[in-house]
């Protein structure tokens, strides 16, 4: 069965979400939002999904502050983060590239990413541009660290990094990524060519499984209409839903 790249990535992320209570999705994140709603459809209403830009799927009435409070109380199990740069230790950069006083690139800012990275047990990193420009040996500015010293209490951290080419999982003990699978149409050699940081990999890298017919049905028939409320252009382009 034919599928779009966005459907593959959403299916992959839904699998990574697993059996949890509450998934929250921040702004400008249509693919993670698709994945969260797909996970809810599969689970018969579980997990609870909070989409920050939604009127229907968001019980927060005071924006980000309530989200941060909820996460700090341990009531959010999965969140998604990205960055202008991500390095091999799971550090993300949402501030700037180059000299801090005179940067060559300025990003919008962290908006609480460091807090959520520490307190949400499972953080899935997501980047649709898999290149040496975005996946770097060391970020120019650490907006949110991927790990902390042993004496620092921390519930959260990176669980995986999903890109348009592959899936990495994160080994907390080694502070390194592991190449878990390569998406159909891509190769392990291609991933290595376009990745700026070092990572571990098996001798034979698996291919990311394609979405099943049932997964595609749920996304197209159940998730897409819900998604159109928050991301109408994305829903129209990917699913033909207005």
Image: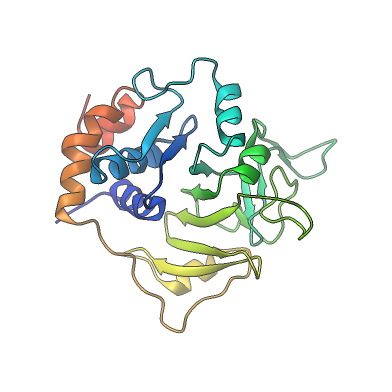
Q: Residue at x 28, y 31 (%)?
A: 235
Is residue 36 or residue 86 the one in the foreground?
36
- Percent of width and height locating residue 67: 55, 28
Using the rendered view, name the quadrant where residue 34 is placed.
top left
Quarter the N terminus occupies: bottom left
Q: Residue at x 56, y 39 (%)?
A: 74
Query: For the view shown, which residue lies furthest in the bottom direction?
Result: 203
Q: Position of residue 202 (x, y in %)?
A: 47, 80
Q: Residue at x 32, y 27 (%)?
A: 233
Q: State the residue lying farthest toward the top.
A: 61
Residue 11 relative to residue 217: left or right: right
Q: Quadrant of residue 173?
A: bottom right
Residue 207 figure quarter: bottom left
Residue 210, compared with residue 37, is above or below; it is below
Q: How many marks?
A: 0
Colouring method of the image: rainbow
In the figure, 132 relative to 235: above or below? below
Please state, as top left, top right, bottom left or bottom right, where the C terminus lies in the image: top left
Image location of residue 178, percent across then percent down: 53, 69
- Using residue 220 as the reference point, say whether residue 133 is left or right of it: right
* Residue 76 image point, x, y percent: 50, 38
């Amino acid at each position: 069965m034919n599928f779009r790249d966005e459907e593959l990535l959403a299916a992959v992320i839904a699998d990574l979400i697993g059996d949890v209570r509450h998934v929250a999705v921040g702004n400008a994140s249509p693919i993670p939002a698709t994945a969260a709603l797909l996970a809810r459809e599969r689970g018969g209403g579980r997990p609870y999904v909070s989409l920050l830009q939604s009127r229907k799927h968001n019980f927060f009435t005071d924006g980000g502050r309530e989200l941060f409070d909820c996460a700090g109380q341990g009531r959010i199990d999965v969140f998604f983060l990205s960055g202008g740069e991500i390095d091999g230790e799971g550090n993300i950069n949402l501030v700037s590239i180059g000299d801090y006083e005179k940067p060559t690139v300025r990003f919008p800012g962290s908006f609480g990413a460091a807090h959520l990275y520490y307190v949400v047990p499972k953080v899935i990193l997501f980047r649709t541009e898999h290149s040496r420009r975005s996946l770097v040996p060391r970020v120019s500015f650490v907006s949110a660290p991927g790990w902390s010293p042993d004496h620092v209490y921390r519930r959260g951290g990176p669980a995986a990094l999903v890109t348009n080419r592959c899936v990495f999982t994160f080994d907390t003990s080694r502070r390194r990524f592991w190449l878990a699978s390569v998406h159909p149409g891509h190769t392990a050699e291609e991933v290595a060519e376009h990745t700026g940081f070092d990572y571990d990999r098996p001798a034979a890298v698996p291919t990311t499984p394609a979405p099943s017919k049932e997964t595609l049905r749920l996304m197209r028939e159940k998730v897409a209409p819900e998604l159109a409320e928050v991301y109408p252009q994305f829903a129209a382009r990917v699913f033909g839903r207005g």
